[in-house]
Every structure is written in C-alpha cells, then in structure tokens.
Amino acid sequence: PAPPADPAAETWWHAADDPWQALSTCYELTDALASPDPARHVSYLPIHMDGSCNGLQHYAALGGDEEGARKVNLLPAPQPDDVYSGVATIVSRLVEEDAQKGHSIALLLRDRISRRIVKQTVMTSVYGVTYVGARAQIQNALSSTDLLDDDAAWQASRYLAAHTLEAVREMFVGAREIMAWLATCAGLIAQSGEPVMWTTPLGLPVVQPYRRPGKQFVQTVVQKVTLQESSDDLPIHVTRQRTAHPPNFIHSLDSTHMMLTCLEMADQGYTFASVHDSYWTHACTVDPMNQILRQKFVDMHSEPLLENLLASFRRNYPNVDFPDVPKSHDLDLSQVLESPYFFH
C-alpha cells in the first residue's frame, strides 16, 4: 500500500507486526517506484534475513537429525516449514485428547491453540527455558489475545506450559539427547568443583561464572542490608553450571556463525549488521549475504564440534569420567546451501 499522507491520522499501518518498520518500508518503496530507474534507487533500508528457530537449527546440524533439520528448514523445500505451527498442532492434539476425557481447562482451550501462543516457549526451549518461564510466557500470550480472563489465563498457562514442552520433546528427539548430554557433562564437571570451560570454533575461551554467592546481612537502624560477595574462590553452583551449559554452548555456536558471516561480509566489502540470528544488509547485497551465511554454517558444522568439545573436556578435566557423544545421524549438510528458507 501507499504510505499514509498523514501517519498520525491514518492508522492502518498500526496493524502490522512491526508498525514502524512497515511504515518506513512503504515510504522507501514509494520513493523507489517514483524514481526514473527503481533498480538504481539508493536505498538505506536494512533488509534482514532471520534464522528458522536458530537454536534448533544448530541442534539438528550437531546431531545430523534429518527429520529435525526438515522442520527448521535446513533442507531444501518448495515452502518453509514452520516449527511453531507444528508444535501448536501437537499441543492442539493433546488438548483435544484431554477435552474428550472431560478435562475442564482442555474444554476451555479446545480449538483455541494458535502458533502465537506457543511461539516464545518454542524459541526459548532450546535455550533452557524452565516450566516456570514457559508458564509466564504462555500466560502473557493468552492475556494478549483476550481469549480468557486473568484467572483463567493463569490456570490455562500452567496446563499449556507442560504440553508445549512435551510437544517440543516429541518433535526434536535428537536435540533432547544432545541437550541432556551437554547438561550431564557440565554436571560432572561442576561436581568435581570446577567451572565448565570450553573454546568456541573461533578460538574464544568460555568459562561459566556461576558460583554460590557469599552473603552477609547487616542490620542498621533503618533497614537490613544484604552484602553479596563475588569471587572465584566461592564454591561452584552445581545446578546453574549444569542447566546453563546447553543454552550457553548453543549461544557460542550461533555467535560464531554470526561472526564468521560478519568477517566474510567485511572481507568482500559488504555492509552487515545483526541481532542474534537476524542478519541485515542492503537490498543490493542480500543475495551474496545469503550465500555467505549458508556457507559459513556448513563450514562450521562440518567440523566434529561435539567430539572436539568432549576431547577438550577430557583434556581439561582428566579425573572426570565423561559419557560418549550421542550417536550422530547422516544428514547431508551441503543441502543447507540450497535451502531457500534456512534464513529468510
């Protein structure tokens, strides 16, 4: 649509997912189409390509999980697969099964489960979201839909959080196995009294800082003051070391992928910016950016990343008996190069 003559008076653009981005795009397209040669119009609008549930993309590549890879668009397909809709479908099935048994909350939610309700929980499940966090996310999503009042939304969110996390586990068996292996290794390291350490594919050393804080309480005339000590001499927080390692390790991979793409874009003289798994460039360099980000993902995951991690663990913690890496499957990673919806 044409941009509004008076954005303050015309409000149709407010309905877009990102209203200000939509408005700026309307103005940019209008200027380009009004120019003598739209193809030569100088545009400063950043064009972004987003990963398809990027954390699960890394897990699928790590495990060679072809079914998981298909669900997060690592494989070529005529149209994009939508993992969020897939999870919503499974949750809807579970709700329907409960509704047929007369479950009161399931009856309330029957035929009301949408992609939007489960999306944030699916996105963060790969980064270690807890049941409590998932419940809060789903309650927020339900509240924004006006489907339920606040009390009903709270009750429904408790119910749906469990089903959503169950659906993710059902869809991504390979990811769950690797996540469990990473947590197990981290737990063994923490129990030995050491923090979890590893090195990213870029060579960046990472040390998890989680320790049990030392606290002192000082009672004053006015109030009680808590003084908290932070020191490398404090005891290791075993639980946080264990639960944080899977998401932190995946973050270290997606940041490596971003940096490898950034460096190659700079080498080739292209403008590049990014926010997590959203990569931005100018319209005229979207095609080369798409080629570069796919090649860098394939290059990184062509290395035995989990085997290298295990080797470093055994080298750094020789007294810890680590389990072997979960069995990998035979995904042909080169197919990522031809997948139009890997980032889109």
Image (cartoon, rainbow, N blue to C red):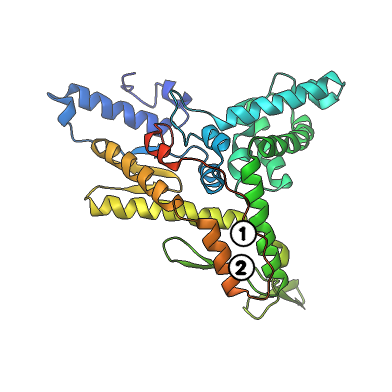
Q: What is the x, y in percent for residue 100?
A: 83, 18
Q: Is residue 125 visible?
A: no
Residue bearing mark 2: 196
**Circle 2 crowding by C-alpha within 10 Å: few under 14, some 14–19, many from 20:** many
Residues at marks 1 and 2 touching, judged by CB atoms closer than 8 Å: yes
- Type of the residue with mark 2: Val
Q: Earlier in the sequence, mark 1 or mark 2?
A: 2
* Relative height, residue 65 to residue 200 (above, below): above
| Quadrant in the picture for residue 112 | top right
Which residue, as the protein is rendered here, is positioned at the far bottom? 233
What is the secondary structure assignment of the residue under circle 1?
Answer: helix
Residue bearing mark 1: 245
Task: Tell whether 82 sits left or right of 318.
Answer: left
Q: Quadrant of the N terminus?
A: top left
Task: Tell whether 146 sits left or right of 339.
Answer: right
Nearer-the-camera pick, 344 or 62 = 62
Q: Quadrant of the C terminus?
A: top left
Q: What is the x, y in percent for residue 260?
A: 36, 54
What's the CA distance linking mark 1 and mark 2? 8 Å
Residue at the (70%, 48%) spot, across then down:
130
Q: What is the x, y in percent for residue 131?
A: 73, 45
Nearer-the-camera pick, 29 or 309 = 309
Nearer-the-camera pick, 267 or 323 = 323
Task: Tell whether 158 sits left or right of 312.
Answer: right
What is the secondary structure assignment of the residue under circle 2?
Answer: loop
Task: Tell whether 60 sits left or right of 146.
Answer: left
Q: Is residue 118 visible?
A: yes
Q: What is the x, y in percent for residue 79?
A: 45, 24
Please give the label number shown on residue 71. none
**Circle 1 crowding by C-alpha within 10 Å: few under 14, some 14–19, many from 20:** many
